[in-house]
Amino acid sequence: MTMDGDFRTEFVREPRALKHFPALVLNADYRPLSYYPLSLWPWQDAVKAAWLDRVDIVSEYDEVVHSPSTTIRIPSVVVLKDYVKPQKRVAFTRFNLFLRDEFKCQYCGAKGDLTFDHVVPRAKGGITSWENVVAACSPCNLKKGSKLLSQTSMSLQKKPIQPASGQLMNMGRKFPPNYLHESWMDYLYWDAELEA
């Protein structure tokens, strides 16, 4: 698909085409803002940010877009000019809980069809917190019910803790998206420890 010529009508006819050519967004230290979900902008936002001088373009696609007076190659990697300080506190959300638990049931290790379970049930005084809630598959959640672990033959694969933002970011690196453009590779895992 070429973006010059009648790309505008092609996008109108094919709304999914708007998802093509995303730009990897790096913080001013050249690290992605997040790994999971990977910090990506639609090409339109990357072009606008470059035009407003909020980012530097590090890498580009071969495709171009036109305005009446300008032709610009679509950015594939942009770096913010101002450093965005990462949040220290991790929000207690279902998604972050599943990410902390690597999208696996903490009782049997199954993946998919996840819900969450209070280790100490709320009926027995358990609270909703990082240290008391784990990802669980539906069968394990039903099997445990409102019992304490000591009342079952079940056990946790690892003790639930409140993760630091860096821990969650590193966890997210284990789950790359289905599509990774080759221009992104030098920026995604550059600080990963090399295997001997």
Image (tube, helix red, strand yellow):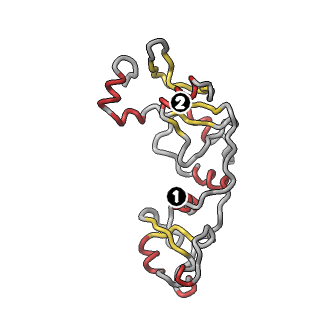
Mark 2 is surrounded, within 10 Å at the Cα level, by few (under 14), some (14 to 19) or many (20 or more) other residues, namely many
Residue drawn at x 58%, y 61% is 92
Q: Position of residue 108 (x, y in %)?
A: 50, 72
Q: Is residue 155 left or right of residue 86?
A: left
Which quadrant of the structure image shows residue 142?
bottom left
Instruction: Pick the residue in front: 47 or 188.
Output: 47
Q: Which residue is mark 2?
A: 46
Residue type pointed to by label 1: Phe
Residue type pointed to by label 2: Ala
Q: CA distance from mark 1 to mark 2?
A: 26 Å
The disc placed on residue 57 is none
Mark 1 is surrounded, within 10 Å at the Cα level, by few (under 14), some (14 to 19) or many (20 or more) other residues, namely few
Q: Position of residue 183 (x, y in %)?
A: 55, 31
Residue drawn at x 48%, y 80% is 144
Q: Position of residue 10 (x, y in %)?
A: 32, 26
Q: Which residue is mark 1?
A: 95
